[in-house]
Amino acid sequence: MSRDPSYGVVDREYGLRLATCDPAEDGPIWMVNLMRYRERAAYADGSDGGRSGREADDEYAPVDVLADIGAEVVFLADVEVQALGAGPAWDRVAVVRYPTRRSFIEMQSREDFRERHVHKEAGMAATIVMGCRPMEVPALPDGVVEVDWADVPHPPTDDDGPMMVIHVLSFNDPDGAERTPDHMSAYQRVAAESAAAQGIRIAGWFSVEGTILGDGRQWHQVRFNGFPSRRAFMAVVNDPRRLEAQRDHREVAIADTYTLMTRATIPFSEAR
């Protein structure tokens, strides 16, 4: 990444960390990509190549290169509703698991990878790419049990199937000086009861160790929560107890956030 692409700013300090990671301490890294497309592709010659921005990105997709280095796309979804978060309005979310941090950086210099970048440059309006590691998922509160999707109030239907809700979080004080963790724990205890009754399935929670490409903002966590339907998630959103806990605790803890309601085209693979 010798120069910044048109769709984001490279964090070169984090890039150096990825490239020089001690092999003894290196290991898998999950790159979470938020993508906003141009309406029409914009190639260097001034043409759109007969493609939309999304189609140009599909042309770029380096699936064979990823496979060659032992990486894989473990999740891909279209954003149906952006419930929270200022612009950009994201179109798609992808998660790629790389076998090591170094492998992500080394891929950037491969000729077969670089040849395709013209399509990504043409199609992408903005993107955030976060290097993530899996977190331990908190247990459900005592007395709260996981509910089968056949038994929830709003089960999946042909018209309203499973939905992955993605929370991208930046905390006011991730070190805890203002009791951010306590506020989030208090909120999560209340939200978990409501979400469990609606059939929540946690696909993976991740801590963000760095943002290799973005707009300068710092992010701390990305959470992937599955629901049997959009109606099920909205029942949680509108739960009065959860709304009270959101006001008293979640809003105190969070500095910036995106909540993205998505439909998966590649369902989440096991992340732990």
Image (spheres, grey):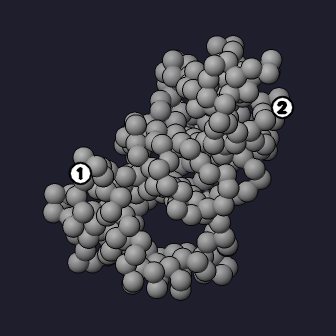
The x, y position of residue 118, in whole percent, is 71, 21
Residue at screen point 24% across, 63% down: 154
* Res. 250 visible in picture: yes
Locate residue 46: give its quadrant.
top right
How crowded pointer 1 is (Cα within 10 Å; few <14, some 14-19, many 20+) is rated as: few
Q: Nearer the viewer, mark 1 or mark 2?
A: 1
Q: Quadrant of the N terminus?
A: top right
Where residue 135 sits in the image (x, y, percent)? 48, 56
Q: Which residue shows up at 31% across the image and 64% down it?
A: 232
Give SS at disc 1.
loop
Residue at the spot x=50%, y=48% of the render? 79
Q: Depth check: 154 or 29 in front?
A: 154
Q: Going 37% across and 64% down the picture, which residue do you hit?
A: 233
Please indicate whether residue 50 sits to the left or right of residue 268 in the image: right
Q: Secondary structure at mark 2?
A: loop
Labels in figure, total: 2
Q: Give the vertical position of 52 relative to 131 (above or below).
A: above
Q: Nearer the viewer, residue 118 or 25?
A: 118
Amino acid of disc 1: Thr
Q: Which residue is mark 1?
A: 157
Determine the CA span between mark 1 and mark 2: 47 Å
Question: Residue 235 in the image: x percent, y percent?
Answer: 34, 70
User: Mark 2 belongs to which amino acid?
Assistant: Arg
Write down the residue under mark 2: 3
Up/down of 271 relative to 220, above or below: above
Q: Does the residue at mark 1 contact the one at mark 2 (Cβ under 8 Å)?
A: no
Q: Residue furthest left?
A: 151
